[in-house]
Image (cartoon, rainbow, N blue to C red):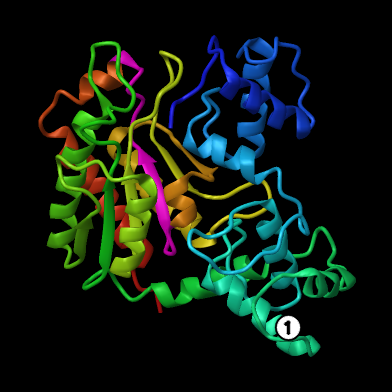
């Protein structure tokens, strides 16, 4: 889709403004003009939804603007292709999970796991078991009031599953996503370096490092391919990958520095396994680069749609001239790959006896 930003005009901008206003944003720009108050509202929305705060309305931000408009009960929910997405699904997942039915992590996607949990709920209350959230089942869900601060059963289950992930990296399929592609250059540094020109080299070097450790790396795109982010997530899921690593570069102020590792998360939930994987990789990157970094929540498409511990790593800021210059060193991709591979290996390392 087209990306909308400060200064743009048109009916699509008016639609964005209308959706933000419906969510409580105060916008005083002329309808259809992406002015300063629209930019501020977009940034506030992105921050609230754990999206990259850049003021750009691209696929992730637009998708979540649409999803935020759905409340539980606004529509009948059932398993279909493409799946229903929205805050109504997320609320259903939260309620079912708090009641003891495994609806998966609260990602707002009505997939097979949500349908199975809904069927089990219907079976337990003596309703017709059809996996459809219609008026009768909705009333039953709403009658069983769940505290707003109820612990996420999905997070508890994922935390417990971490114990079973400590058997070593040998033989495991590790999905590697080289960010962007030939028709999607990504961000650009002050000297003209394009993000897409270096992510594949890092991904290929990481594949070599993981192979040396006995893992089975799988690149989610070839050098000249440009699949959608959802297609990359689907490939990782179909591979049955034990972990997924997406490689990008960061952007920010000219003096912004250091590595960043993102894991799936929002204001109300996160992936405990993804958080631990991000922490292990960040530790290795900080040691290799000699500069501090951060591990942060992000509700981006790849992290949201993959079904295994997943991280998006950004070793440096391409908008920092000093860090951009590091990319010209032929050995740099290998240094990053060695650090990331060691972080992944540490994540899967057997627990000490």
- Residue 301 in picture, x, y percent from top left: 46, 47
Mark 1 neighbour density, 10 Å: few (under 14) some (14–19) many (20 or more): many
Q: Which residues are magenta?
A: 306-321
Compared with 169, 263 (above or below) is above
Q: Position of residue 170 (x, y in %)?
A: 22, 71
Q: Secondary structure at mark 1?
A: helix
> Can you say whether 22 is above or below 276 in the image?
above
Q: Relative to 248, does residue 96 appear above or below in the rendering? A: below
Which picture quadrant has residue 73? bottom right
Residue labelled with disc 1: 122
Can you give x and y, in whole percent of width and height, for residue 29 in the image?
Answer: 70, 11
Residue 280 at x, y = what percent? 40, 53
Describe residue 122's horizontal placement relative to residue 32 as left or right. right
Quadrant location, the C terminus:
bottom left
Quadrant (top left, top right, bottom left, bottom right) of the N terminus: top left
Q: Residue at x 42, y 49 (%)?
A: 302
Residue 84 among those drawn in magenta: no
Near-viewer residue (8 or 294): 8
Residue for point 66% across, 59% down: 89
**What residue is drawn where x is 32% and y is 23%?**
318
Q: Residue at x 51, y 22 (%)?
A: 4
User: Would you say residue 283 is visible in this rendering?
Assistant: no
* Above or below: residue 65 compared with residue 7: below
């Amino acid at each position: 889709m087209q990306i909308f930003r400060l200064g743009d005009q048109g009916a699509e901008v008016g639609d964005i403004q209308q959706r933000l206003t419906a969510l409580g944003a105060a916008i005083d720009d002329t309808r259809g003009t992406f002015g300063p108050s629209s930019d501020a509202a977009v940034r506030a929305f992105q921050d609230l939804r754990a999206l990259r705060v850049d003021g750009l309305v691209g696929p992730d931000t637009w998708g979540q603007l649409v999803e935020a408009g759905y409340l539980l009960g606004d529509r009948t929910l059932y398993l279909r292709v493409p799946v229903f997405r929205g805050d109504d699904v997320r609320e259903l997942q939260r309620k079912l999970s708090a009641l003891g039915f495994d609806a998966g992590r609260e990602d707002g996607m009505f997939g097979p796991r949500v349908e199975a949990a809904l069927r089990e709920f219907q079976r337990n209350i003596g309703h017709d078991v059809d996996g459809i959230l219609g008026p009768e089942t909705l009333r039953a869900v709403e009658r069983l009031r769940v505290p707003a601060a109820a612990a996420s059963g999905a997070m508890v289950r994922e935390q417990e599953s971490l114990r079973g992930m400590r058997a070593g990296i040998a033989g495991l399929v590790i999905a590697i996503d080289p960010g962007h592609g030939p028709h999607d250059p990504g961000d650009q540094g002050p000297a003209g370096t394009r993000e897409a020109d270096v992510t594949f080299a890092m991904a290929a070097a990481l594949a070599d490092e993981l192979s040396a450790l006995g893992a089975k790396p799988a690149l989610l795109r070839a050098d000249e391919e440009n699949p959608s982010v959802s297609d990359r997530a689907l490939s990782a899921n179909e591979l049955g990958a034990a972990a997924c690593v997406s490689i990008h570069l960061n952007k920010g102020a000219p003096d912004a520095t250091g590595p960043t590792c993102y894991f799936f998360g929002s204001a109300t939930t996160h992936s405990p396994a993804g958080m631990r994987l991000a922490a292990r990789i960040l530790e290795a990157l900080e040691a290799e680069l000699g500069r501090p970094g951060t591990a942060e929540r992000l509700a981006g498409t790849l992290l949201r749609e993959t079904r295994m511990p997943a991280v998006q790593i950004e070793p440096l800021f391409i908008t920092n001239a000093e860090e951009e210059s590091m990319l010209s060193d032929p050995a740099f991709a290998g240094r990053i790959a060695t650090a990331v591979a060691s972080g992944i290996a540490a994540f899967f390392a057997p627990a000490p006896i």
